Image (spheres, grey):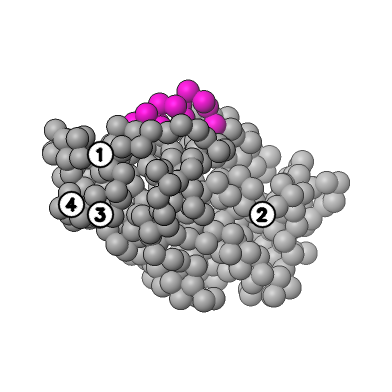
């Protein structure tokens, strides 16, 4: 009998499995041939603790020490720049307040990102405490922790049936039955489908597509030290990545769960919004892709036992904040299982608790 069976090998599932493995026999099942294949593998990979709803910010702040220090750390300096056009003063200051960001002089912004267009850009803010996350290292570290405690991390495992037993659950994947006391649903865009298979009421999660384009370094610049840039309306962002620039239209288009791909028209519109702020025209794309960022109805994460069955745990609704919140989110799951008091405040715990949908 398995103690803890986790369905889903993205950052939510791998981090939860790593926290659970020291407490009992743990098995993780991932449908794809590799961990982090869907949303986790297509993340913008930024740690910005001020970004998101209050509960997300609380989780990010509680995760900061792990990101910086655990297992040698997973972060490297990046910084985040907020960019507004002339005539957008009120919107710019509202965005600065939302992100707890300070305005900087335009000359300083142009020095940091020399392709910003002085004819159109009228405002800039900057926060230095934003970091690149080594996402692959983090997922593989969590998987390694699980295995070090005798747990199993199994890929290419398609779950086809889930049955409730008196002793827990029987999960069938690739013709093999796994019996477990407690089931953890970390299936990303498919979490409601897994819930239905288990006879648990779905919560109404919505997968939202987010597209990304990789373009050559603008103007042949060395962009390695540039910050990530974010439009004040959050309708585009750009981030250096391995000598190239990633540009996203930052769209949130509802989708059915699937292996997502970028929409060419949506990409073109997002690139046009980016181009309004810079002097360098986008002449070609090197590649493009998309991922599904899955949100609960109130856009807070859902972490904890289901109302209709406490042997079924939601590890769901990361909504694009999975990596930056994973250390604290997975610790909360482990604390609930172990019966330990969480370090998170009561307001945050209530915002994350599945009971809020009852």
Badge 3 element? helix
Q: Which residue is mark 1?
A: 117
Residue assigned mark 3: 111
Q: Which residue is mark 2?
A: 35
Residue tagged 4: 107
The residue drawn where x is 18% and y is 44% is: 123
Dot placed on the residue nearer the N-terminal end, 2 or 1: 2
Relative to 47, residue 216 above or below: above
In the picture, the quarter occupied by the N terminus is bottom right
Q: Which residues are magenta?
A: 262-273
Q: Does residue 199 belong to the magenta stretch?
A: no
Q: Position of residue 332 (x, y in %)?
A: 48, 64
* Distance (Cα) linking label 3 and label 1: 12 Å
| Secondary element at tag 1 | loop
Residue shown at the point (25%, 54%) measured from the top left: 111
Q: Position of residue 207 (x, y in %)?
A: 52, 36
Q: Is residue 298 left or right of residue 74?
A: left
Query: Is 165 rendered above or below residue 19?
Result: above
């Amino acid at each position: 009998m398995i103690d803890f069976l986790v369905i889903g090998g993205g950052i939510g599932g791998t981090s939860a499995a790593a926290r659970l493995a020291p407490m009992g026999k743990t098995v993780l099942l991932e449908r794809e041939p590799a961990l982090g294949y869907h949303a986790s593998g297509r993340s913008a990979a930024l740690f910005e603790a001020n970004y998101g709803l209050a509960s997300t910010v609380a989780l990010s702040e509680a995760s900061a020490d792990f990101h910086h220090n655990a297992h040698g750390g997973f972060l490297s300096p990046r910084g985040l720049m907020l960019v507004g056009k002339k005539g957008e003063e009120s919107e710019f200051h509202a965005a600065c307040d939302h992100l707890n960001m300070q305005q900087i002089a335009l000359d300083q912004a142009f020095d940091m990102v020399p392709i910003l267009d002085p004819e159109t850009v009228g405002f800039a803010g900057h926060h230095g405490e934003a970091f690149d996350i080594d996402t692959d290292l983090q997922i593989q570290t969590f998987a390694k922790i699980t295995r070090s405690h005798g747990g199993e991390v199994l890929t290419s495992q398609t779950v086809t049936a889930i049955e409730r037993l008196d002793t827990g659950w029987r999960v069938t994947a690739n013709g093999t039955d796994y019996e477990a006391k407690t089931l953890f649903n970390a299936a990303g865009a498919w979490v409601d489908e897994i819930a239905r298979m288990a006879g648990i009421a779905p919560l109404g999660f919505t997968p939202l597509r987010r597209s990304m384009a990789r373009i050559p370094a603008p103007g042949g610049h060395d962009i390695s030290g540039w910050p990530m840039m974010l439009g004040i309306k959050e309708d585009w962002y750009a981030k250096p990545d391995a000598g190239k620039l990633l540009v996203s239209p930052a769209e949130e288009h509802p989708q059915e769960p699937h292996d997502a791909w970028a929409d060419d028209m949506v990409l073109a519109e997002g690139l046009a919004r980016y181009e309004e702020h810079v002097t360098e025209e986008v002449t070609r794309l090197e590649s493009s892709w998309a991922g599904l960022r899955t949100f609960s109805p109130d856009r807070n994460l859902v972490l904890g036992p289901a109302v209709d069955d406490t042997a079924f745990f939601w590890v769901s609704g990361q909504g694009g904040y999975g990596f930056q919140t994973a250390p604290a989110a997975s610790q909360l799951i482990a604390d609930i299982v172990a019966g330990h008091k969480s370090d998170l405040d009561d307001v945050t715990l209530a915002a994350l608790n599945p009971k809020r949908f009852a």
